[in-house]
Image (cartoon, helix red, strand yellow):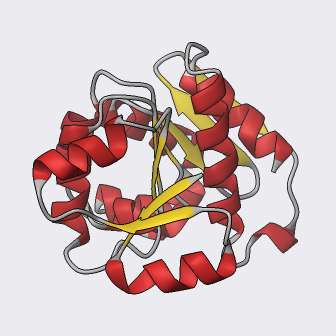
């Protein structure tokens, strides 16, 4: 496993997961392209991006054209600007994995609107983002251009810090291994396994 993280997170990653190769995000676009292209089968842009998360996400999304999972800080970086994220995600297998508050921020709506209209808003967000949307919660909803899937599994214990990171990793692994399958199908599988 190779992890590219904010420079201040390298030591923590190496200490917590000694088998992983950890490196800081490159400053130069060519080095960034090599960092993600040379070894990656899928990419997970998620928490603890550090500094200017929006600029980093834009650089990574322009450099990488393969399967991708976008979560946490990467979603919050595009708060109120879902169309810009959709432009960057267009043309690749991609899944965004927000919880209701993250989707509300991304779409610029009240969180109550997401909770009350989770099926419709997930479907609308999928169209805007050109990606599958895995909206975490009870129930978990996965939407894409083909419709909405409901994942009835899950428990309140999953509503804790770090749980979404595990889901993102499961999904990234599935995208890497089965990238020719529809992203929404893999998202529903990941949510069920999680």
Q: Is residue 119 above or below residue 19?
A: above
Camera-nearest residue between 106 and 166: 166
Where's residue 39, x and y in %? Answer: 44, 38
Q: Is residue 18 rendered to the left or right of residue 107?
A: right
Q: Quadrant of residue 89?
A: top left
Q: Residue at x 66, y 29 (%)?
A: 186
Q: Residue at x 70, y 60 (%)?
A: 166
Q: Quadrant of residue 33?
A: top left
Q: Residue at x 47, y 70 (%)?
A: 47
Q: Is residue 33 rendered to the left or right of residue 102?
A: left
| Residue 148 can be seen, yes or no | no
Q: Is residue 27 rendered to the left or right of residue 14?
A: left
Q: Is residue 25 above or below residue 94?
A: below
Where's residue 80, x and y in %? Answer: 23, 61
Camera-nearest residue between 55 and 106: 55
Camera-nearest residue between 183 and 38: 38
Q: Is residue 193 above or below residue 94?
A: below
| Residue 129 can be seen, yes or no | yes
Camera-nearest residue between 173 and 104: 173
Where's residue 88, x and y in %? Answer: 22, 38
């Amino acid at each position: 496993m190779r992890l590219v993280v904010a420079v201040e997170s390298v030591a923590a990653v190496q200490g917590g997961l000694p088998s992983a190769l950890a490196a800081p995000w490159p400053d130069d676009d060519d080095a960034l392209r090599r960092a993600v292209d040379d070894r990656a089968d899928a990419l997970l842009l998620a928490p603890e991006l550090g500094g200017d998360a929006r600029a980093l996400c834009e650089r990574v999304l322009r450099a990488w054209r393969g399967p991708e999972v976008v979560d946490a800080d990467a979603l919050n970086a595009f708060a109120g600007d879902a169309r810009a994220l959709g432009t960057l995600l267009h043309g690749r297998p991609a899944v965004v994995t927000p919880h209701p508050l993250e989707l509300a921020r991304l779409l610029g709506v009240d969180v109550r609107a997401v909770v009350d209209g989770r099926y419709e808003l997930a479907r609308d967000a999928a169209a805007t983002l050109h990606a599958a949307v895995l909206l975490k919660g009870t129930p978990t909803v996965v939407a894409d251009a083909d419709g909405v899937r409901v994942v009835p599994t899950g428990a309140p214990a999953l509503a804790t810090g770090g749980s979404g990171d595990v889901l993102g990793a499961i999904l990234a692994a599935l995208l890497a291994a089965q990238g020719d399958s529809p992203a929404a199908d893999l998202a529903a599988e990941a949510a069920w396994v999680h």
